[in-house]
Image (tube, coloured by chain):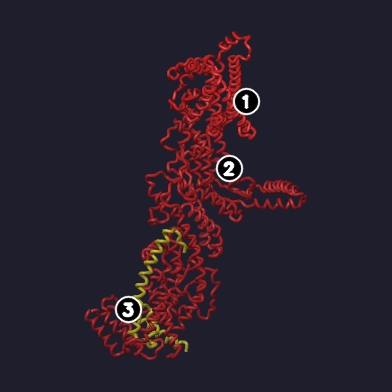
Amino acid sequence: PQRHGALQVRDLDREVKNLIKHTSGIDDEEDHNFQAALKFAWSNFRFHRFLDVDSHKVQRTINGIYEKLMVHSDLSKAESWMRLSGEFLNSPLPNTEGVKTDAHHGVLALLLFLSDCPSNASFSERPRLRDAGRFDWAQYLLEGEDVDPGPFPDTPEWSEESEEEDGQQPLSREDSGIQVDRTPQEDHEHHNKSVPVAWKVGEPDARVWLEQHVVTPYWVSHAPRFPHSLHLHSNLLNVWDQHLYNTDPLYLPEEKVFVTESQVIRETLVWPGLCLLCQNFVFCLSVCCSHEFVCSFCFLQNCLRSLLEHIAAYGQAVSRLQKFVDEVTGYSPETSPPGGSSSSSSSSSSKRGSEPPFRTYQAFVWALYKYFISFKEELAAIERDLITKDETVTLMAVLESLYPHLAQIKVLHKVFCTGVADVPPGTPNVVRASHLLNTLYKAIIEYDSVGEASEQALALLFSLWVETVRPYLEIVDEWIMHGHLFDPAREFIIQRNKDVPVDHRDFWYATYTLYSVSEAVDGEEKLSDAASGSSGGEQAASSRQLTMVSFLKPVLKQVIMAGKSMQLLKNLDCKEAEQHEGPARDAERTSLYMLFLESVQSRLRRGEESPTDTVTEQQATKRSLIKMQSIVARHLELGDIHDPLLAINFARLYLEQSDFHERFSGGDIIMDRSSESVTCQTFELTLRSCLYPHIQLRYIECCGNLMRTLKKDYRLIEYLQAMRNYFLLEAGDTMYDFYTAIFDKVLEKESWQQLSFLNVQLQEAVGQRCPEDSSRLSIFLETIEPTRKKQPINNLDGLTLSYKVPWPVDIVISSECQKIYNQVFLLLLQIKWAKYSLDTLRFSVSKRFDGGHEENPPKDPVHQQIHRMFLLRVKLMHFVNSLHNYIMTRILHSTGLEFQHQVQEAKDLDQLIKIHYRYLSTIHDRCLLREKVSFVKEAIMKVLNLVLIFSDRWQAGFGAWKIESIEKMESDFKNCHMFLVTILNKAVCRGSFPHCKFDLNS
Amino acid sequence: MASAANTNMNAVRETMDVLLEISRLLNTGLDMESLSICVRLCEQGINPEALSSVIKELRRASDTLKVSEFNSLSVSFIIMDQLGCFFL
């Protein structure tokens, strides 16, 4: 029936749209391309200049083609052509009555216009099936039946039998043994259209690969003309199809693919195994889904699609992780895309041949691998369930059961992305290792603070961390146990500087480099010398907010100290007792990592009841309940509340918390993390209680050994004492012999500034008492510029003692220390000189004067002069003596005692060095040698100078005296004295120099 | 009545089969679905010559479109792969 008007226009419009959709492949009607095409089509249809179809012309063309085919001696084709065209012209058209109408000719004309070299095209007529019989079978079977579409999604009636009926080879899939429902794949007529639309985009290789490797591509539709599946749940679909087919003669069954739910589930399960495929997989799924299902199922299809896409995202994550695992283990050939994000790891694997393995990544990968093994086991279990069909497995149920794993994968992937994938290529291993460990650490802390909500993730992360940290701990273990920093891949944050030998005095400071990563610049900073653990390095480290491996941070100093001490100790031991080092040195001890694992285990097991013995379990529960109750009650009592019921309830509440355990496997050990410590910062607490004590213990042991060895075998204490003996003049008699010889020479106005003379004096003095020190001690005379020599007191400048300290004691007593010693030594020498010159003044002259002028009146100016000289001398003596006493006893002696005490208590070498330095700086300060108090020293020097001038004058005899010079000396002394008294009094009142209380009240 | 309609429908279906054979012989590149669309259009009086020119034009346009689409798509694939965040 002809339709007219608006109806016809609407139909026409719809058909044109269909045509455009079908031809161009643009499904979106809103697409501007689509609109343009629509416009174009309509304008062509409406405003064309073509003639109407002429049946004669069409007939002529038909004959022409026939002739042409005959000429090409393509007889069968020619025969088919004539027969088919004739048959068509005599056949009815769907909406046109009669035969050989204009419409018939129009259609033929259209085909002729579109024809493309018919003579060249290979063609063999296909036998057309009279399918009525086949269809009737189905109809016949279904007729009169109350077709029950079945509970649609929940009952996948997928039986092996139906498959066997097909008589086809079961498909084998090596990985999962998946089999595909092939009931719809009966005879097919549409081979030429088997390529799904989506594949047109490209990637034919991918498709071929898929077809070859995965499974017989059930998604490639081999849709039968009349699709009916043996699946019950697709009956609704079939009925609907049948209806459409019967009502519309031109209805073509869509390219439908039947994916049963079990298939979907199995694909879902398989994706981690075939993770590389997953994006292709979703591609396929979307292909088969996007083929238009019957419109009423559209929502379902979208639903399914989004669901599967969701899973596929996880599949993607798994695939990245798996790829990483493969890359690190070198399992598969490099397949990563060039310049891909995994280039950092791929670069590591490409360099693998020459470089030592990067153990931190390997450990991480091993942990991941273990996780995936368990995960796959679980997947396999679900699949087994699916195959045995003991219980109904639905997609939703599977997803539900997978959900915790999916969350874990999400966490893993996040950690992986930040910890591994985001690291730019070319980063040194140390940064990558510490970054990875830090990421894990931070993630653990983060999830830890969340509490119960993330127990699973936390357990996973913790096990990952425990595994990943293994190389680090092994390095630490090796280092602090054997003093050997074995780190071929340079991944540890501390690295040995190759160019410093152990038996060098710089060993302690310059051997190790602490690599630390600054978070802000994410670059690598070399904090050379920070490894010494001295205060300077530490401050720098803390001020920069470094992200060096955080978990080691609290014990880093101990680790460094223990490591260095151990290495030093080994080197010391090597000389003495090498034979003690056996090859079985590791046999009798457990490694640090094992110790750590054991304590983690014991910590986690605490509070865990044995599941076998329920009685003890209950008892334990009861006991802990009582214990808890008492604790809670005590707490409540603190708040003045006495409510036993409340206490019990609180206790129960706390106890319930301890019911959840996390199980995870670390190594071959099952570890549980009891909740006993879930409150806050548990991870750090765990570390503190499980890892740090071992390191601490080892640290104490190592450093104690080292200190003992140094003190006992290397006579550290004796050397320190020697320093004090000679530099600080504690060996009074020895040094007295030495310096009085010099002073005598000065007094006699002889030249004493000869190195040989000085050394001979020194050797004589020392050799008598301590022969072994005499070889080590030597004295030098530095030439100093003459401008500084104008004062007699400065004559002694440039005199330096040198004491050859043997290794390893020179780590403590360095040349810098000797410089400070020398400064003090010089000061002491100056004081001694002043004291000596005052002490040695003879009374002979004055006695002579005294004797001769006993009866002289006191007004005698000479007598007065002498008297004033005496007075001045006594005053000067008093000053010098009190200064001498103060420095020698109150400062040097007491500080020395303090120092000796501290040295005894020093735990490690670093501490000892620090103590020594502190001691030196203290005496340096207190001897007023600091720049800040130089004015005080100046004044004292002035007085000492005065003393020397005075004694010089005295020696010259009374005749040389002038009353003015005496007055000048007196006034000078008075000035200096007054100045010092005021300054020091002020200082003492202010409390700045509590040590400067020497008596000046003369 | 029903069977008459049924026979008619079968006849029509057979016609379409014949037509598909003709189409294959002439190497028109039309499949069953586009063929049935064309038949409906022709029946409604669309000029076959105009229709053929439209179809040819559409084919050409969609080919160029797909090429450019493929290019951009492959580029974006590469980019996404590089970024390592190919989340579907």
Label 1 crowd bin: few (<14), some (14–19), many (20+), radius 10 Å: some
- Secondary element under disc 3, as helix, strand or loop, is loop
State the separation of the CA atoms marked 3 and 1. 124 Å
Question: Picture quarter containing residue A922?
Answer: top right
Residue located beneath label 3 in the image: B28
Residue A70: image location, x then y, percent: 23, 81
Q: Is residue A872 left or right of A170 when viewed as pictured?
A: right
State the separation of the CA atoms marked 2 and 3. 79 Å
Q: Chain of mark 3?
A: B
Quadrant of the image for the C terminus of chain A?
Answer: top right
Residue located beneath label 1 in the image: A1000
Which amino acid does the dot numbered 1 rest on? Leu
- Secondary element under disc 2, as helix, strand or loop, is helix
Residue A772: image location, x then y, percent: 48, 19
Question: Picture quarter containing residue A245?
Answer: bottom left
Q: Is residue A635 left or right of A314 when viewed as pictured?
A: right
Evaluate if marks 2 and 3 touch, with contact meaning CB atoms under 8 Å apart: no
Position above or below: A445 against A928: below
Furthest residue in direction top, as rendered:
A852
Residue A712 in sight from this viewpoint? no
Q: Is residue A76 left or right of A540 when viewed as pictured?
A: left
Asked whether A511 or A528 is in front, the reply is A528
Residue A441 in sight from this viewpoint? yes
Circle number at residue A690: 2
Residue A306: image location, x then y, percent: 50, 67
